[in-house]
Image: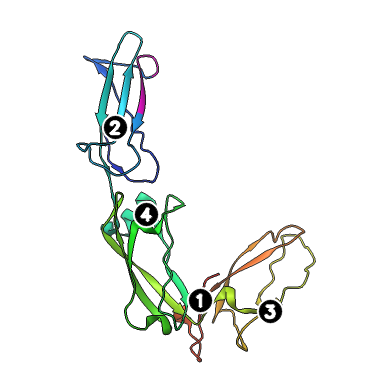
């Protein structure tokens, strides 16, 4: 017998099986071995290429037993907790405003691996959202063998992506000290078209790497997004 519920996960499901001869529970490895077929993609147990466990009897027993099971599609309409439990993450979209009516696609990952965009349909904002700073909505609809339903994600149209601003002043070589060195924003200067970016208004420091040993260290910054527009309407996103 096979018990449990199985949802598409991007790799093969290998459900545990129990094999009986009458009331006797057979021993895996000694009395039988198990292999699996069609166990990656979503499919019903009663379809032609149903997910299946193939039990090959051995020792004092002979023959094969085929046990079929269902792998369900991931339902994008299942809600945040459901998507978290199945291992699906969808990143919000950050892009700089542009005269060109094009939109970046969100990055979708399943159990840490990127899922090809061909598994989804993306419905972007209508009109001139690409030209105007603001937060809009992208609707993502699952299609094909393994995804169904729909969900939404934010599309942030900002003045510029943080990676495209100008580094006017770089961090100078720092002297190592016990506990490491974490230079603040006073040690560097970022500008965008002549405007100096300000920590807490345009960006924040989100981390340091290799700061606690001699060598090359890095500071990671993140743009604070649409909600932090300054008086001139400037806002930045990305890292």
Please state the total of marks drawn on the protein image. 4
Determine crowd level at label 3: few under 14, some 14-19, many 20+ residues with C-alpha closer than 10 A.
few
Nearer the camera: disc 1 or disc 2: 2
The quadrant the C terminus occupies is bottom right
Tell me the element at label 4. Answer: helix
Q: Circle 1 sits in a helix, a strand or a loop, which is it?
A: loop
Q: Image point 37% across, 46% down: which residue?
A: 9
CA distance separating discs 4 and 1: 25 Å
Say if 134 sits above or below 206 in the image.
below
Residue topped by disc 2: 52
Question: Between tags 2 and 3, which lies in front?
Answer: 2
Dividing the picture into quadrants, the one containing residue 227 is bottom left
> Which residue is label 4 attached to?
84
> Is residue 1 shown to the viewer in this render?
no
In magenta segment, residue 32: yes
Most foreground residue, 56 or 1:
56
Where residue 31 sits: x, y (%)? 35, 14
Q: Residues within 10 Å of mark 4 (few under 14, many from 20)?
A: some
Q: Which residue is mark 3?
A: 186
Instruction: Report the side of 146 relative to 188 (left or right).
Output: left
Say which residue appears at 80% left-offset and 66% top-offset.
175
Q: Which residues are magenta?
A: 29-35
Is 61 one of the magenta-colored residues? Answer: no
Name the secondary structure under disc 3: helix
Q: Earlier in the sequence, mark 2 or mark 3?
A: 2
Residue 36 percent across, percent down from the top left: 35, 30
Say which label, 1 or 2, has the lower sequence index: 2
Q: Which residue is mark 1?
A: 224
Q: Answer yes or no: do the residues labelled 1 and 2 have beta carbons within 8 Å? A: no
């Amino acid at each position: 017998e096979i018990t449990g519920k199985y949802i598409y996960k991007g790799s093969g499901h290998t459900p545990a099986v129990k094999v009986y001869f009458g009331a006797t529970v057979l021993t895996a490895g000694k009395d039988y071995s198990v292999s699996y077929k069609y166990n990656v993609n979503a499919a019903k147990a009663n379809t032609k290429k149903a997910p299946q466990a193939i039990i090959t009897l051995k020792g004092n027993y002979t023959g094969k037993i085929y046990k079929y099971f269902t792998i369900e599609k991931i339902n994008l309409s299942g809600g945040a907790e459901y998507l978290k439990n199945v291992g699906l993450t969808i990143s919000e979209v950050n892009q700089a405003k542009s005269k060109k009516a094009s939109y970046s696609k969100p990055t979708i990952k399943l159990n840490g691996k990127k899922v090809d965009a061909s598994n989804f349909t993306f419905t972007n904002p209508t009109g001139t959202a690409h030209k105007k700073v603001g937060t809009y909505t992208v609707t993502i609809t699952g299609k094909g063998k393994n995804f169904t339903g729909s969900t939404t994600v934010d599309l942030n149209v900002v003045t510029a992506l943080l990676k495209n601003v100008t580094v006017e002043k770089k961090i100078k070589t720092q002297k190592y000290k016990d506990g490491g060195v974490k230079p603040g924003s006073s040690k560097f200067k970022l500008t965008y078209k002549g405007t100096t970016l300000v920590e807490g208004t345009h960006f924040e420091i989100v981390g340091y790497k290799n700061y606690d040993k001699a060598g090359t260290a890095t500071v990671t910054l993140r743009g604070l997004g649409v909600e932090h527009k300054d008086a001139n309407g400037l806002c930045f996103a990305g890292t």
